[in-house]
Each structure stands twice: as structure tokens, then as C-alpha cells.
Image (cartoon, rainbow, N blue to C red):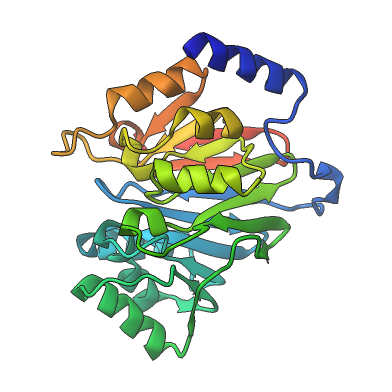
Amino acid sequence: MSKILNMLMAFVMSFGISGSNVNPSDIPENSNFEVHFIDVGQADSALIECDGETMMIDGGNVADSNVVAAYLKKEDVTELNYVVCSHAHEDHVGGLSGALSVTKADNIYAPKTEANTKAYKNFKKKAEEQNVEIKHPNVGDEIQLGSSTVEFLGPVDENGKDLNSTSIVLKITYGNTSFLFTGDAESNEEAEILNSGADLKSTVLKVGHHGSRTSTSYPFLREVMPQYAVISVEKGNSYGHPNEETLSKLSDAGVEVYRTDESGDIVMTSDGNNISITTSK
């Protein structure tokens, strides 16, 4: 299986289609694009900045609220154009209350499926306090973040699914580079997105479910064909994340892997063609 995956990877890369088909000349002069994968331990949080506009995807656990708030202050972010809760589990929604306590949000997105937990209720309360309606994006919806484009690819179907498989999956394209965020989407949601015909090819993959063996299936990885992968995970966590099987798949595909437990905060900067990476550790 790994030999086939390597052959496919070489074929895709030889045609230069690991990113998007956007002409980098469409990027305005003095444009900038950064993705900050914030180290929130066994949780997920990312801040995207493009041409003065910002998006936050997840906020870690409730206990990470201060970490997320401090990071936003460090980046001088007082307004978030978009806030995305990938799904209702605490390790993704919990710290968004902290983010919404120190910033103004213009738009908030979340799946339709909610959780009857204090963490999720606090998230909804913060949205209500700002008079912002929580929107439920549809597959194929697109929004602009500066000169980058954000496309929602999942969930295709939320009916009767566990919370992980209601995860919002989105792809951010900037020039010829792209970033795929998968929340905790597991193999069944990955299969539904594959069957939808979505263009998954991306330069960077935020690995699903902290590197669990139930995500990053071979068919999904073959379509994404990333150059880089990021795993948000805590050192010595009780789940055994990231799973050795998942790490082996990424290794077989020739993907360069970054982990928050090893690298701390991970910042990826794109010029529309190439990505440079800095870490806090």
C-alpha cells in the first residue's frame, strides 16, 4: 500500500498540482498570509491572518481560554472576521469563549449539531452577547478572507452522527498554496467528502482528530497529498495520539510532519507559492 501511495504522490507532484490552481499574480502587492497553529495541548486551535483580516478555527479546552486570549493579544487581534467551531466537543469549542471575551466577532460558524455541555452553552452565550447569529455553512459555500478563499467541504451529512463526524472541514487557498482543516473528522466523514467530488489537494493538512487511527484514511490522504501536516496533540496524552499507524501513513506519503507537543506554536507563512515555517520550541 505504501509503495502505491508513494507512486501516486510522485505522479501528483510531477504535475505541480499539490496546491490550488489560483494564479499567484492575483495576490495583491504587500499581501500577507499566516496560519498560527496554537499549542493548546490535547486540543485544537488555529489563527489565520490574511491582509489584515482574521479567522479563528477552534479554541482548545475551557482551560485554554487564557492561552488563546493571550495569543490574540500578542498578535494585536481585537476583531475576528470569522470564528469557526469545528464541532461541539470541549477540546475545540471550550476556549472560544476566551477568544470572544477579548475580541469582536463579525461572523461565527458551527455545525447544526450542538452539545448540552457548559462549554458549548458558554460559547453560544458569548455569541449572543455580541448579537452574532451562529451560522451553519453548507458544503460548497465560500467566503473571502483577505485575498484568500475559504471553501466549506464538510460535513456532507450530520444526521445521526457522533460529534466528531459533524466536524466542519474547510480549505483555505492562498495563491498556489492551500490549507485543509479537518476538525476531528473520522474516516466515515472523509469518505462522504471524497464521494462529494471535492478538490482536497492541499499543501498543508491539519491532521484529523489529533492523529487518531480513525482519521486520515489512505483514500483521503491520497487525495489531499500534502507537503506538510500538523498534528495538534499533548505530550504523553492518555489517548495515545498520534497513532503510529497514522504517522506511518504520513511517512509513507513523504509528508513533513509538525506536532505541537514537539514544536509548540507552529506558524506557517505563505507567499502564494512557498511556505516558511517557524516554531516556538
260 and 213: which one is in front? 213
Position of residue 248 relative to residue 125, above or below, is: above
Instruction: Residue 5 in the image: state x and y as whole percent.
Output: 55, 17
Q: Residue 253's spot in the image, x, y percent?
A: 51, 19
Q: Is residue 134 left or right of residue 161?
A: right
In the image, taking residue 201 as reference, residue 64 lies left or right, namely left
Quarter of the figure that contains the C terminus: top left
Residue 148 in sight here: yes
Determine the residue located farthest toward the top in the rendered image: 3
Decide if residue 262 is on the left or right side of residue 182.
Answer: left
Observer-nearest of 208 and 58: 208
Residue 63 sits in quarter = bottom left
Q: Residue furthest left?
A: 238
Quadrant of the image occupied by residue 16: top right
216 relative to 224 in the view: left or right: left
How many numbered discs sit on the rendered protein?
0
* The quadrant where residue 235 appears: top left
Q: Is residue 275 above or below residue 183?
A: above
Q: Residue at x 68, y 31 (%)?
A: 18
The image shows residue 211 at horizontal and vertical percentages of 34, 35
Which residue is located at x 47 percent, y 15 percent? 252
Judge by depth and name the residue closer to the eye, 94 or 50. 94
Q: Position of residue 258 (x, y in %)?
A: 41, 31
Residue at 52% of width from left, 35% of height from top?
220
Q: Residue at x 60, y 61 (%)?
A: 139
